[in-house]
Image (cartoon, rainbow, N blue to C red):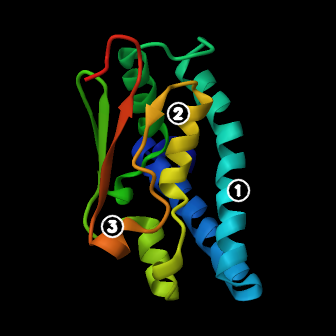
């Protein structure tokens, strides 16, 4: 049996995500060192926006979601739960829940956001612009889902001591 066949799906997801997060952190560090925080923030957010353009079609395909536009809360919940199941490793310590009729709450375990940990170590948490929640915002935009989001720009963990919030979705018949 090969090593790949002997590793479990969750362990493989952890390993691949650790590699991705290490690359992401090293990319951020080297941009910061060479270009400064303002340029690094701008490049990071641009990269997040571009990533979503590729990520959403890939997730649609992986999840078998062929509709061009998500039209109901049930469809959104199924898609987002599937997407998070595909990409969220255990070490990220992120939770979310759908609250009828039209909300999704989310929260990082206190102090556990990987981006917060990294920018805190680098000493730039004060002025870091959050790419993590920007990514989720872009997902909803690319899925054609009308929403009001928390508008996270700065690191909430650093500025408020916790990171969480809610999205409100504006599908017909779900306004509350």
From what the image shows, is residue 24 above or below residue 15? below
| Quadrant assignment, res 42 | bottom right
Query: Element under label 1?
Result: helix
Provide residue 4's location: percent of width, then percent of height.
56, 46
Going 59% across and 72% down the picture, which residue do you hit? 25
Marks 3 and 2, the one that precedes in the sequence: 3
**Which residue of the protein is positioned furthest toward the front in this rendering?**
176
Marks 1 and 3, the one that precedes in the sequence: 1
Q: Which residue is mark 1?
A: 47
Spatial CA distance of label 3 from label 2 is 24 Å
Q: Quadrant of the N terminus?
A: top right
Asked if labels 2 and 3 touch by Cβ distance under 8 angstroms, the answer is no
Asked if labels 3 and 1 touch by Cβ distance under 8 angstroms, the answer is no
Q: Which mark is residue 140?
A: 2
Of badges 3 and 2, nearer the viewer stands 2
Going 45% across and 51% down the picture, which residue do you hit? 151
Going 44% across and 41% down the picture, which residue do you hit? 9
**Which residue of the protein is positioned furthest toward the right in this rendering?**
34
Query: Element under label 3?
Result: loop
Going 63% across and 14% down the picture, which residue do you hit? 68
From what the image shows, is residue 155 above or below residue 34? above
Q: Is 95 left, or right, of 33 in this rendering?
A: left
Spatial CA distance of label 1 from label 3 is 23 Å
Circle 3 crowding by C-alpha within 10 Å: few under 14, some 14–19, many from 20: some
Q: Which residue is mark 3?
A: 112
Provide residue 62's location: percent of width, then percent of height.
58, 25
Circle 1 crowding by C-alpha within 10 Å: few under 14, some 14–19, many from 20: few
From what the image shows, is residue 73 above or below residue 57? above
Q: Quadrant of the C terminus?
A: top left
Of badges 1 and 3, nearer the viewer stands 1
Marks 2 and 1, the one that precedes in the sequence: 1
């Amino acid at each position: 049996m090969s090593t790949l066949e002997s590793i479990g799906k969750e362990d493989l997801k952890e390993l691949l995500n650790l590699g991705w997060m290490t690359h992401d952190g090293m990319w951020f560090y080297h941009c910061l060192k060479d270009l400064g925080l303002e340029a690094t923030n701008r490049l990071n957010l641009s990269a997040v926006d571009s990533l979503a353009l590729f990520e959403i079609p890939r997730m649609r395909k992986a999840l078998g979601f062929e509709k061009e536009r998500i039209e109901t809360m049930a469809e959104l919940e199924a898609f987002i739960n599937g997407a998070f199941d595909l990409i969220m490793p255990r070490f990220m310590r992120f939770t979310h829940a759908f609250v009828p009729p039209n909300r999704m709450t989310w929260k990082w375990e206190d102090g556990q956001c990987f981006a917060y940990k990294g920018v805190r170590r680098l000493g730039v948490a004060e002025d870091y612009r959050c790419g993590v929640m920007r990514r989720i915002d872009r997902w909803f935009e690319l899925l054609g889902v009308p929403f009001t989001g928390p508008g996270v720009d700065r690191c909430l963990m650093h500025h408020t001591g916790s990171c969480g919030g809610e999205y409100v979705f504006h599908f017909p018949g779900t306004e509350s």
